[in-house]
Image: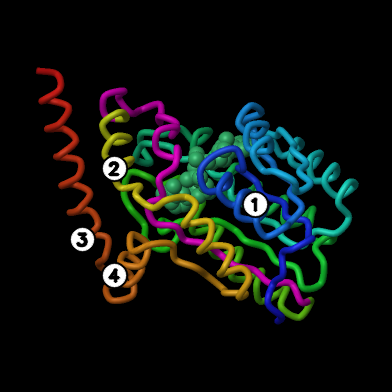
């Protein structure tokens, strides 16, 4: 497949009001793409669009957890942009809590935003994707390595990975590429805005959020460049940062037991969080 040329093409990006999506919008604008940006955060989206300079930008405020709203926004996008060169399913949410600490509704909400919306948008927008076009689906390192305390997020991101890898094989004959992205820790709002599972104590949630946020070190602008270069080169998958590359290697070296090592590291992190909370409270 030819290298993806984004100049002058239409690029649809979900979750564009913050973090990796906002950085992707900026990188795509620098490449001369026409932007269609989706997010539930109207103010954030307007602020991003205002900073993008001269490229044509359309914004859509939509809650991707709502299947009817996704169908409506996809129809509106197709009507206005009958030819799409790049679709980036980037929007995502996190939820704190072990499986027994979250309700099935909370679990379903994570699946709806992270996985179902990705599937629905691929399905609805695929007929508009040009031959030679490309789809990028953002999974996570947690779509390769499972961790305790995040069953919903892990399930959603493994699902994005499996879906994307199968879709890539199906779309290759039609000349449409697919890249699945596995970021490590990128410095965004994902941990700070994570929803608290209803069985998780507030202090436990706050401590977990703080510790998790400390692991998010990669500059979103750098992550966006890595992602777009991978798409331009039609890579099947891209690992963003060492915080993705090391766990990925671990899962391949120790496929049956990597979980124990990750659990030990997570327990050390949790103990640190508890000690830090105790120090703060006196
Ligand atoms: N930051 C990381 O370390 C990291 C690591 C692995 C994977 N990811 C993935 O990267 C993607 C981008 O996340 P980020 O880190 O930039 O987080 P972020 O919270 O900064 O940005 C996520 C964006 O998605 C939007 N969004 C969330 N739910 C939505 C909904 N229901 N409808 C519409 N928009 C919605 C938010 O408003 C926000 O603008 C996510 O899929 C996330 O799971 C992030």
Residue 261: mark: 3
Magenta part of the chain = 175-204
Q: Badges 2 and 3: C-beta atoms under 8 Å apart?
A: no
How far apart are the alpha carbons under marks 2 and 3?
19 Å
Residue under numbered circle 1: 118
How far apart are the alpha carbons under marks 4 and 2?
21 Å
Q: SS class of the residue under badge 3?
A: helix
Q: Is residue 189 above or below residue 241?
A: above
The foreground one among 186 and 176 is: 186
Q: Quadrant of the N terminus?
A: bottom right
User: At which x and y percent is residue 140?
Assistant: 46, 56
Number of marks: 4
How far apart are the alpha carbons under marks 1 and 2?
28 Å
Residue under numbered circle 2: 214
The foreground one among 143 and 176 is: 176
Residue 181 in the figure: left or right of residue 267: right
Q: Quadrant of the C terminus?
A: top left
Quarter of the image where one finds residue 82: bottom right
Which numbered disc flags the more N-terminal residue, 3 or 1? 1
Q: Residues within 10 Å of mark 2 (few under 14, many from 20)?
A: few
Foreground mark, 4 or 2? 2
Q: SS class of the residue under badge 1?
A: helix
Q: Badges 4 and 3: C-beta atoms under 8 Å apart?
A: yes
- The residue most toward the front is 54
Q: Badges 4 and 2: C-beta atoms under 8 Å apart?
A: no
């Amino acid at each position: 497949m030819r290298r993806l040329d984004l100049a002058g093409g239409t690029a649809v990006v979900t979750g564009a009001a913050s973090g990796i999506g906002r950085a992707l919008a900026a990188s795509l604008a620098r490449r001369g793409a026409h932007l269609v940006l989706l997010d539930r955060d109207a103010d954030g989206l307007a602020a991003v669009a205002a900073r993008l300079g001269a490229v044509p930008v359309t914004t859509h405020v939509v809650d991707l957890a709502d299947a009817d709203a996704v169908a409506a926004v996809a129809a509106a996008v197709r009507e206005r942009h009958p030819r799409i060169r790049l679709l980036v399913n980037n929007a995502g949410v996190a939820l704190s809590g072990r499986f027994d600490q979250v309700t099935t509704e909370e679990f379903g909400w994570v699946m709806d935003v992270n996985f179902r919306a990705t599937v629905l948008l691929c399905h609805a927008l695929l007929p508009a994707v040009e031959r030679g076009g490309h789809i990028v689906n953002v999974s996570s390192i947690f779509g390769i390595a499972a961790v305790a305390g995040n069953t919903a997020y892990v399930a959603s991101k493994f699902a994005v990975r499996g879906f994307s890898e199968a879709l890539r094989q199906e779309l290759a004959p039609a000349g449409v590429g697919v890249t699945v992205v596995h970021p490590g820790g990128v410095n965004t709002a994902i941990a700070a805005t994570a929803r608290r599972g209803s069985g998780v104590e507030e202090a436990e949630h706050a401590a977990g959020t703080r510790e998790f946020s400390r692991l998010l070190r990669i500059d979103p602008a750098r992550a966006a460049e890595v992602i777009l270069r991978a798409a331009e080169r039609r890579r099947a998958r891209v690992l963003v940062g060492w915080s993705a590359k090391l766990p990925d290697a671990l899962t391949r070296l120790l496929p049956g037991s990597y979980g124990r090592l990750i659990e030990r590291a997570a327990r050390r992190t949790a103990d640190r969080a508890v000690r830090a909370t105790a120090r703060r409270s006196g």
